[in-house]
Amino acid sequence: MRLGENACPFTAGYWAFLDRVEPRIRHNHRMAQPLSGLRRLADREAVVDQELHRDSW
């Protein structure tokens, strides 16, 4: 689960991290598959926004 109060911080954090570093890694052929998955996320903006506002543990 990527969104909501019970969202897994590892899953959502992974996608938010990839979103943040995409400009720096988009030319690395080894990252093509994960970045393709990121681009297919229908809730990408919501996940990134949620992680920006997540309280630290």
Image (tube, rainbow, N blue to C red):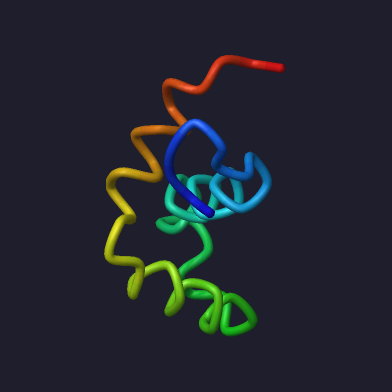
Against 10, is 31 above or below?
A: below
Residue that sits furthest to the right in the current view: 57
Tell me the residue at 34%/75% (across/down).
40
Determine the residue positioned at 45% across, 58% down: 22
Q: Is residue 39 above or below residue 47?
A: below
What count of labels does the image hold? 0
| Residue 30, quarter of picture | bottom right
Residue farthest to the front, as pictured = 6
Q: Is residue 20 left or right of residue 28?
A: left
Q: Residue at x 48, y 74 (%)?
A: 27
Position of residue 11 relative to residue 42, above or below, is above
Residue 28 against residue 21 in the figure, above or below: below
Residue 8 is situated, as x and y percent measured from the top left of the image, at: 63, 45
Q: Quadrant of the C terminus?
A: top right
**Residue 38 spot, x, y in % from top left:** 42, 67
Q: Position of residue 28 (x, y in %)?
A: 57, 75
Q: Is residue 32 left or right of residue 8?
A: left
Residue 18's x, y, as percent? 52, 55
Residue drawn at x 45%, y 76% is: 37
Question: Observer-nearest residue: 38 or 28?
Answer: 38
